[in-house]
Amino acid sequence: MAPPRKRIARETDAHALDVIGEKRIANARKASLPAQYSATGRPIRRSKKTENNAFADSTYAISDVESSVSGSDSEVEPIPRSTASRKRKRTPPPALTPDRFLETSARSTPNPQPTDTQIAPPVTTISNNNRAAPISLTFNIPTGFQGPLTINIDANDLIRSAAPQLTSITASKTNPTATAKPAAQRKSSNEVTSKSIPGKVGFLDLPPEIRNEIYRAAFVKDQRRINFSSPSHFQRSAAFLRTCRQVAHEGASMLYSECEYYFRRNTSSRTPLWTTDSKEIGFSDIHRFLKMIGPANVARLRHVFFLLEDAVPCLNPQFKTAEERRYVHDEHLRAAIRTIADHGRLQTLKLGFFGRRNIAESDSNFLNEIKAIKADSVEVLARRCHPDWPRLYSNLQWPKIFFHLALDVKTSVTRKRKFYPPWKEGKKDFFEDDSDEETREARLCTDCGDVHV
């Protein structure tokens, strides 16, 4: 029988062999599983890092490599995961240079002297001490103007115009010796230019009152009425208003505000380009004129005279009946009335209904378009105010509108609140002074001696 020590050693070796055999079996099982699974068969997170053991038995390592090589054909290779690209961070700006280094570099670097041909514009700053001369703005607003007055002022132009004054002030304060020579040069150059180009006073340099008198003499003169039935004086606005924008604006206000526009049917004929048949002009030129001058100039009209007549039968063969030739069906006339109603700011309005048939309640559409016009003073003319009254003396039924309709038109067109102040004593108006407009009573005309509404 073996001694106890040897028996214990044998038992210990046998137990160690059993333990080693169990470990080999476990390692073989681990090697047979794919790489993305753990020993227990659970999936391994790809972002999880494998632990690096400090010590590994060579026998276990060799067996693991052999088993992994043998089972590589049956294993599924893991799909490599693409690493997400990180967003590039913005590079921080470089550190600012300290002011002391800038001052030293400025002292060490000499300032280049600008030549006569290339002078850099100085940078000027406006402070409380340096103030430029004030700028005066004058606005000539016509009487009765309503609406927003928009004034667009560019600050860059103001600074640019005030820059020479501020530059001379700041330069004289900072370095008076350096600006002495350029000032002398500027003085000599000014003397040369004043001798070569003498100073002249232009039209826009005159006071506004004198310019208004010149506009009045050029556009209004003695004949205040602009007659569309026999066009004349239409060349008044041709050349003078095209000189510049300011003259066009000032002269247009005088041309349209201080003239009476006499809108009457033009009985002359005209042949269009696309046909050989001549047609009566009628009210087409009036509609074209109002459309051509635009809403801004239509709003400047103050005195309008509508003399409404029917079309001439011999000049309008396309109209077969007298009803078709009535002025209430004229599209050009109705379009002109709508234009004045939409954009006009009239002061006085004269209406003469001299057709072949009386205006009745059945012509309500035409009367409603006339009622849309608003004016401070409205007058419905009598028969003797017609320019052809001596020749048409036999027609005693003018005006061709019933009296109650004439009163209704006058009441609807007249403004309750006046836009324009009443005319002063001694100042001649285009029309008579209507002192009893609101009384709805008929009165005698001082010109023709007939009854007006």
Image (cartoon, grey):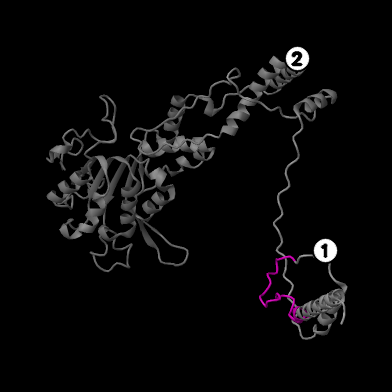
Image quarter of residue 12: bottom right
> Residue at point 73% right, 42% down?
93
> Residue at point 61% right, 28% down?
161
Image quarter of residue 92: top right
- The residue beneath circle 1 is 54
Q: Judge whether residue 354 can be spotted in this image.
A: yes
SS at badge 2 = helix
Of residues 117 and 310, the one drawn nearer to the viewer in this rendering: 117
Q: Is residue 34 magenta?
A: yes
The residue range painted magenta reads: 28-49
Which mark is drawn over residue 180?
2
Query: How many numbered tags mark residues here?
Result: 2
SS at badge 1 = loop
Q: Amino acid at mark 2?
A: Ala
Majority secondary structure of magenta residues: loop
Label 2 Cα neighbours within 10 Å, binned few <14 / some 14-19 / many ≥20:
few
Q: Is residue 424 above or below residue 176?
A: below
Q: Where in the figure is residue 240, as x and y percent of width and height?
A: 50, 37
